[in-house]
Image (tube, rainbow, N blue to C red):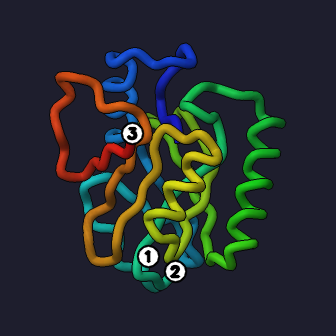
Amino acid sequence: MRPGVGTQPATAPPTWTGALLEAYLAARYEVRGPAGPLVLRVGEAAPPALAEALPARSWTLLTAWNPGSRSRDHASNRLADAALQADLDALGLRRLPASNSDGGGQWHEPGWLVADLGTAGADTLARRYSQAGILHWPAGEAVRLRMYLARPPGVAGSPWVDWVE
């Protein structure tokens, strides 16, 4: 997921990581449920309809698009998405289509809301597809963001963000 941040160098300086964190926190995450779209926001409870659309003990929203939060061509993104879908299928995981966009809806990135993917599995897939961050949270709790970059000095903590280094 890479909502609303421009192309950056391979090694992200701390100020860029802080800006990326703000973009993730402000992003719009939308799941395509059978009865219509379900909007997720970091730090807020998921809509009750999510449990009806995709019953689970936990959910993970991830994508294979734009690894490292750097823009990549459409064809490469589609190939990575197909590989991610194959991985999800091999694990036998249920899922719904999702999309991520910046707060203004400009940056669009397709992804998947996955049911019952444990934290270790979520981390494995996020790293396999070089994602800077994903959403992962237990049912009944607020949506949480997992960041896979080093937490920069001076960036305030958030109760909804888990830094995984």
Query: In the image shown, does 51 or 85 lie closer to the viewer?
Result: 85
Disc sitting over residue 24 in the figure = 3
State if disc 1 and disc 2 touch (CB < 8 Å): yes
Q: For residue 19, which quarter of the picture?
A: top left
SS at mark 1 in the image: helix
**Residue 59: % across, % down:** 45, 69
4 displayed left or right of 22? right
> Picture quarter containing residue 124?
bottom right
Observer able to see residue 7: no
Amino acid type for the residue under numbered disc 2: Leu
- Say whether marks 2 and 3 touch (CB < 8 Å): no
Residue 50 is marked as 1
Which tag is nearer the camera, tag 3 or tag 1? 3
Q: Which residue is mark 2?
A: 54
When the figure is inspected, residue 144 is found, relative to residue 138, above or below; the finding is above
Q: Mark 2 to mark 3: distance in Å? A: 23 Å
